[in-house]
Amino acid sequence: MISKACREIKEIDAYLKLLNEENADREYALLGDVRKKRVTPYLIDEETFCCLWNTQMYEKSNRHPEHLKFKTRKGELVRSKSEASIANIYFEMGIPYRYECALSLDGNIVLHPDFTLLNTAHRRIMYHEHLGRLDKPGYLEDQMWKFKVYQKNGIFIGKNLIITAETEDHPFDQELFRKSVKDIFL
């Protein structure tokens, strides 16, 4: 068994070495702009993938536009200082996001998560809900309904849904959030 495992490790190492040396994505990236226009890559590199996602139009929430008062470094308006901090951290760390992007779910339900994120390393979409009004009566009950809808649609806390929360006595901690984002995305 040990000899078979050792042989398998050698084969995996040889494959990984080959993959690092002869990579189609790397070769495409080395092409000049003129040649890139003539070639359709089989796989899109991370930078192009991110750029395409960032340039796609999306439906934003039109709920209470008068509450959009806080400007982010990206130049958009959000509803709270904490959401502005969250957006700025994502922006500074180079994590593509959309603010209050429409999300159509089963049962003809459309939600607008606070942030829709692109995890470029894994090429998957994630969501972030900031619970900024936990002191308000009834707020948590509304959020629980939303979390059940998320779960029914395959969106789970710890998998593809990030939750942050605050109250008046327990404000949003930017540095703790920044560390969490590094763990999740970088």
Image (spheres, rainbow, N blue to C red):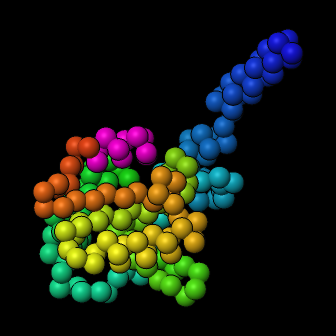
Residue 153 falls left or right of residue 13:
left
Asked if the stretch drawn in magenta spans residue 90, the answer is: no
Q: Nearer the viewer, residue 22 or 116?
A: 116
Which of the 4 image quarters holds residue 129? bottom left
Q: Is residue 179 magenta?
A: yes
Rendering coords of residue 38 (x, y %): 64, 59
Residue 91 % position (x, y): 30, 55
x and y, in percent, of residue 59 in the image: 41, 81
Q: Compared with residue 78, is residue 84 higher up or lower down, i.e. above or below?
A: above
Q: Is residue 77 left or right of residue 115?
A: left
Residue at horizontal 43 percent and vertical 46 percent from the top: 185
Q: Is residue 87 left or right of residue 115?
A: left
Q: What residue is drawn where x is 19% and y is 68%?
A: 135
Question: Which secondary structure class fits the magenta region best?
Answer: helix
Q: How many marks?
A: 0
Quarter of the image for residue 106 reads bottom right
Using the image, determine if residue 8 lies above or below residue 105.
Answer: above
Residue projecting furthest to the top: 3
Q: Is residue 114 visible?
A: yes
**Picture residue at 86% right of the left edge, 15% below the top:** 1
Q: Decide which of 130, 40 is in the foreground and name it.
A: 130
Q: Quadrant of the C terminus?
A: top left
Q: Along the horizontal axis of the image, is 64 left or right of 118?
A: left
Q: Which region shows up in magenta?
A: 177-186
Q: Is residue 96 visible?
A: no
